[in-house]
């Protein structure tokens, strides 16, 4: 399961390539304005900090995003220097990068640009930033991935979100898996699933395990080493499997809720 930091980095990387309108109208500000996140509409203005806040909102929700970046609802957090000050005032400021941290550029107390750290080494830091790329011809700004030296004089520091508010859930234990298997065996497997049989041209009751065996046989071959089915009837057989799986999945979901 991905950590909170990994989720933020992945979301940011997925946004790379987005280009705003020449008027700086952008999808992130539209979304954040719809939530009433700031002290007024921000669409059409510089939007680097809006992009960073949006990353936390998209990954963890509005309430968590506000709390973990030490902001208040309806505040002025769309301004880089304001966001940076909130981190510092709450003891959440660092001179070192970290995955998912908010990087600020400028000087301490006069930050003018920001982004999210998506990677770093002993000598470099890689970011994803909104409202950048003007030197590349993006008149309204774009979302771009950038890499800097750790000693770059433009880097003022890093805001450290309160990750404890969105800790990764514990990984599933072997005991949990055994419990799931027991539920599937005792409940799903014994529950008839009605699927269409192309061979017999009628609906027939089958159990979930037969469906899963059919999936295995059709895709990877039978256990005794026979090759996967490549006959002309394969298409119909696969459709039967798909129908059965769709029904079996709904049953599995129903019984998993009992855990």
Image: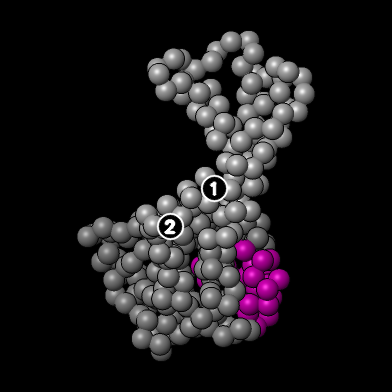
Classify 207 as above or below 173: above
- Residue at 54%, 47% (x, y): give it: 186
Q: Please state, as top left, top right, bottom left or bottom right, where the N terminus lies in the image.
A: bottom left
- Residue at 32%, 67% (x, y): give it: 97
Q: Which mark is residue 73?
A: none
Residue at mark 1: 186
Which residue in the rendered view is the most extreme toward the top?
232
Q: Nearer the viewer, mark 2 or mark 1?
A: 1
- Residue at 62%, 24% (x, y): give it: 238
Colouring? one colour
- Mark 2 or 1, nearer chain start: 2
Residue at mark 2: 176
**Element type at marker 1?**
helix
**Element type at marker 2?**
helix
Tell me residue 206's x, y (percent).
Answer: 64, 32
State the separation of the CA atoms marked 2 and 1. Answer: 15 Å
Tell me residue 216's x, y (percent).
Answer: 50, 28
Tell me residue 142's x, y (percent).
Answer: 55, 56
- Residue at 64%, 21% (x, y): give it: 237
Q: Which of the two residues, 30 or 240, is positioned nearer the viewer here?
A: 240
Magenta segment range? 28-52
């Amino acid at each position: 399961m991905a950590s909170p930091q990994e989720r933020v980095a992945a979301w940011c990387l997925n946004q790379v390539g987005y280009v705003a309108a020449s008027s700086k109208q952008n999808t992130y500000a539209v979304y954040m304005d719809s939530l009433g996140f700031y002290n007024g509409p921000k669409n059409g203005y510089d939007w680097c900090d809006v992009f960073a806040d949006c990353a936390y909102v998209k990954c963890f929700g509005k309430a968590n995003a506000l709390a973990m970046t030490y902001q208040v609802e309806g505040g002025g957090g769309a301004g880089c220097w304001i966001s940076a000050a909130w981190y510092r005032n709450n003891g959440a400021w660092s001179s070192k990068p970290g995955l998912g941290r908010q990087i600020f550029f400028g000087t301490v107390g006069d930050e003018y640009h920001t982004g999210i750290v998506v990677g770093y080494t002993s000598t470099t830091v890689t970011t994803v930033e909104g409202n950048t790329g003007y030197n590349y011809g993006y008149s309204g700004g774009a979302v771009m991935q950038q890499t800097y030296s750790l000693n770059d004089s433009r880097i003022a520091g890093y805001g450290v979100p309160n990750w404890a508010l969105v800790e990764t859930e514990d990984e599933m234990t072997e005991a949990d898996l055994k419990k799931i298997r027991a539920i599937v065996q005792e409940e799903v497997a014994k529950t008839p699933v009605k699927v269409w049989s192309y061979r017999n041209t009628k609906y027939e009751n089958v159990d979930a395990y037969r469906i899963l065996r059919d999936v295995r046989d059709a895709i990877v071959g039978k256990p005794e080493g026979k090759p996967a089915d490549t006959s002309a009837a394969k298409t119909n057989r696969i459709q039967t499997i798909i129908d059965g799986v769709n029904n079996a999945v709904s049953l599995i979901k129903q019984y998993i809720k009992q855990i």
